């Protein structure tokens, strides 16, 4: 008892919070009353070294009530809801993939516990059924026997604010499954990694101001799994959980993060619709054979035939590169008789005069395998001098021996 009291006092010092804020007109669908707090329910089961459970006897008439704090709408919570009252919280396992439709965040739920099982998964308290040596979900068609949502959902706020993360065993069972707010949190991989890898659920460390850490756990099925973790320092609202001796946090959606720097991401800022290129701003110049477009099942791009030492210019419309970061040009090109860097050239300008021959062009070091017929992928970072709202790209062909084919022209940049 002394140790438990000390732990609770430590938590009172660490956490400063506010109560769940709910003020709604009743919409009764359940006529009973809660007769047991969630903390009293949790006290009926001792967390073991392995997954374990205690049956709640039929006829015990144990009824709890709490506010829903989780949603599976964004795919990060799977087949469970969390509810909490002023004394604690519990995860309820339910065999359904669209729980947010029936059990909405901020809605009150009454739970008749008779016949259910109070147990744990890797030391995280859960309510459900027990079979095959582990906690199991309540079948969806049986939920009407146990779960009774009432009232209209309203906005909720975390009960506790955390600025430091204690060790897993120093956190009382009543603190797990609660909605909490982390203040002064930083993702150690912010701006670099995504919330989850595509192949499996992923963990990322969150570092607090005092150096303590907690793990953000994200499902690879979450709708935001491929988004980049935010950079900087901010606040995170989520459910406090554990996995054996690891303290974890699970969020409903990225809306639960605030104050962070949204990292810039590489985006395509310019590409070509070859079927309509010349009606969408691409122009031709010079005294050589004109550039043409070709769109079929095997090729989509520009081409120009060999000329007798004449110049054929292909010039892009203006591209706004002002305000972007790290712009890069890429395209594929091919010459049937081999590439010649003296007669197949690429340029850019930010001061186009309307005439290719009077414009001051900056050459790009275009390269490929000379003397070979092969498609070559070209890419190059554009220099700072290209960061203009009037950037234009140009290709100049003056080869008398070989045609030139261009495709997949695009510019990417950080935005």
Image (cartoon, grey):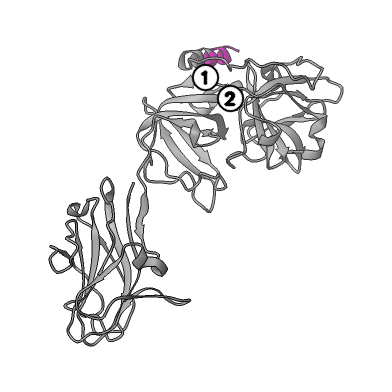
Taking the image as shown, residue 310 lies to the left or right of residue 12, namely left
* Relative to 352, residue 298 above or below: below
Dot 2 or dot 1: first in sequence order is 1
The residue that mark 1 highlights is 160
- Graded by Cα atoms within 10 Å as few (under 14), some (14 to 19) or many (20 or more), the crowding at tag 1 reads many
Numbered label tally: 2
* Relative to 382, residue 238 above or below: above
> Toward the viewer: 124 or 408?
408
> Toward the viewer: 34 or 313?
313
Q: Quadrant of residue 213?
A: top left
> Does residue 337 appear in this view?
yes
Is most of the magenta stretch helix, strand or loop?
helix
Looking at the rendering, the stretch of residues picked out in magenta corresponds to 1-8
The residue that mark 2 highlights is 178
Toward the right, the furthest residue is 59
> Toward the viewer: 153 or 286?
286
x, y (%) of residue 324?
28, 48
The N terminus - image quarter: top right
x, y (%) of residue 37?
70, 16
* Relative to 184, residue 381 above or below: below
Q: Quadrant of residue 75?
A: top right
- Residues at discs 2 and 1 in contact (Cβ within 8 Å): yes
């Amino acid at each position: 008892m002394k140790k438990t009291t000390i732990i609770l006092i430590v938590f009172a010092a660490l956490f400063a919070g506010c109560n769940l804020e709910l003020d709604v007109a009743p919409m009764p669908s359940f006529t009973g009353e809660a007769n047991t707090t969630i903390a009293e329910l949790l006290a009926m089961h001792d967390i073991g070294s392995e997954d374990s459970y205690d049956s709640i006897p039929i006829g015990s008439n144990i009824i709890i009530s709490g506010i829903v704090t989780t949603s599976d709408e964004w795919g990060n919570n799977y087949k469970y809801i969390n509810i909490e009252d002023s004394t604690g919280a519990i995860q309820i396992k339910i065999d359904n993939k669209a729980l947010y439709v029936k059990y909405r965040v901020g809605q009150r739920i009454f739970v008749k516990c008779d016949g259910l099982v109070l147990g744990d998964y890797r030391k995280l308290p859960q309510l459900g059924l027990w079979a095959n040596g582990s906690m199991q979900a309540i079948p969806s068609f049986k939920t009407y026997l146990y779960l009774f949502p009432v009232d209209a959902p309203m906005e909720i706020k975390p009960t506790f604010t955390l600025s430091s993360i204690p060790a897993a065993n120093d956190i009382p069972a009543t603190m797990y499954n609660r909605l909490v707010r982390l203040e002064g949190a930083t993702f150690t991989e912010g701006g670099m990694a995504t919330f989850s890898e595509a192949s499996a659920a992923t963990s990322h460390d969150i570092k607090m101001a005092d150096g303590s850490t907690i793990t953000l756990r994200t499902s690879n099925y979450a709708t935001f799994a491929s988004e980049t973790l935010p950079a900087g320092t901010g606040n995170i609202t989520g459910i406090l959980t554990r996995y054996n001796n690891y303290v974890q946090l699970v969020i409903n959606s990225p809306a639960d993060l605030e104050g962070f720097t949204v990292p810039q991401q590489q985006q395509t800022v310019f590409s070509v619709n070859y079927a309509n290129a010349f009606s969408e701003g691409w122009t031709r110049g010079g005294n050589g054979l004109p550039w043409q477009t070709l769109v079929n099942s095997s090729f989509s791009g520009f081409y120009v035939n060999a000329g007798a030492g004449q110049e054929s210019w292909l010039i892009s419309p203006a591209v706004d590169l002002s305000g972007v970061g790290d712009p890069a040009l890429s395209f594929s090109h091919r010459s049937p008789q081999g590439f010649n860097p003296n007669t197949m050239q690429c340029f850019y300008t930010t001061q186009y005069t309307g005439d290719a021959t009077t414009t001051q062009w900056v050459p790009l070091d275009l390269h490929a395998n000379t003397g070979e017929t092969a498609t070559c992928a070209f890419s190059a970072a554009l220099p700072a001098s290209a960061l203009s709202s009037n950037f234009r790209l140009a290709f100049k062909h003056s080869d008398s021996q070989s045609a030139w084919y261009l495709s997949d022209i695009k510019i990417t940049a950080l935005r």
